[in-house]
Image (cartoon, rainbow, N blue to C red):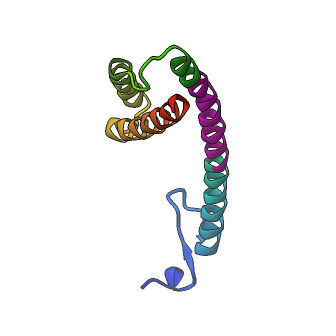
Amino acid sequence: MSPGRAAGWLPPAGGTRVTTQDATTRAAALLAEHRQSIDRLDAILVYTLGERFKHTQAVGRLKAEHDLPASDPAREATQIARLEDLAQQADLDPEFAKKFLNFVIAEVIRHHEAHQS
């Protein structure tokens, strides 16, 4: 092992000394930034789902008032296909997006059925 490595520094590509402690500190700061972004995005997801469910609750009430079925397989298939396309555009695994939407749809149908009983 070279004396520099034993002393705890690694020469970066530019030739300036960077200690492993500096690199670790920088990595911790970057990690904190990513986590803050993730926390903000999680909040956006929760509030967006809340808004979505307000609309699906209204749809459920309308369906119940007009004796319409809780499930609309044609609409659900269209939505799943649309979400798969959006997922590909967003560089997100389309299969994950499909599973997520299927979960949401199942919950919406459960709520719609509750309105009908």
Please tell me which residue is depicted at 63% across the width and 41% down the height of the picture.
Answer: 46
Foreground residue, 69 or 18?
A: 69
- Indicate whether 111 appears above or below 29: above
Please tell me which residue is depicted at 35% across the width and 28% down the height of the picture.
Answer: 84
Image position of 99 (left or right of 5): left
Q: Quadrant of residue 93?
A: top left
Please tell me which residue is depicted at 62% across the width and 33% down the height of the picture.
Answer: 48
Foreground residue, 38 or 1?
A: 38
Which region shows up in magenta? 39-58
Question: Residue 53: x, y in percent?
Answer: 59, 32
**Magenta span includes 97:** no
- Indicate whether 1 appears above or below 105: below
Image position of 110 (left or right of 82): right
Look at the magenta stretch and give its main secondary structure.
Answer: helix
**Magenta span includes 45:** yes
- Indicate whether 91 appears above or below 40: above
Question: Residue 89: x, y in percent?
Answer: 40, 26
Please tell me which residue is depicted at 47% across the width and 33% down the height of the picture.
Answer: 113
Q: How many marks?
A: 0
Foreground residue, 28 or 47?
A: 47
Question: Residue 49: x, y in percent?
Answer: 59, 35
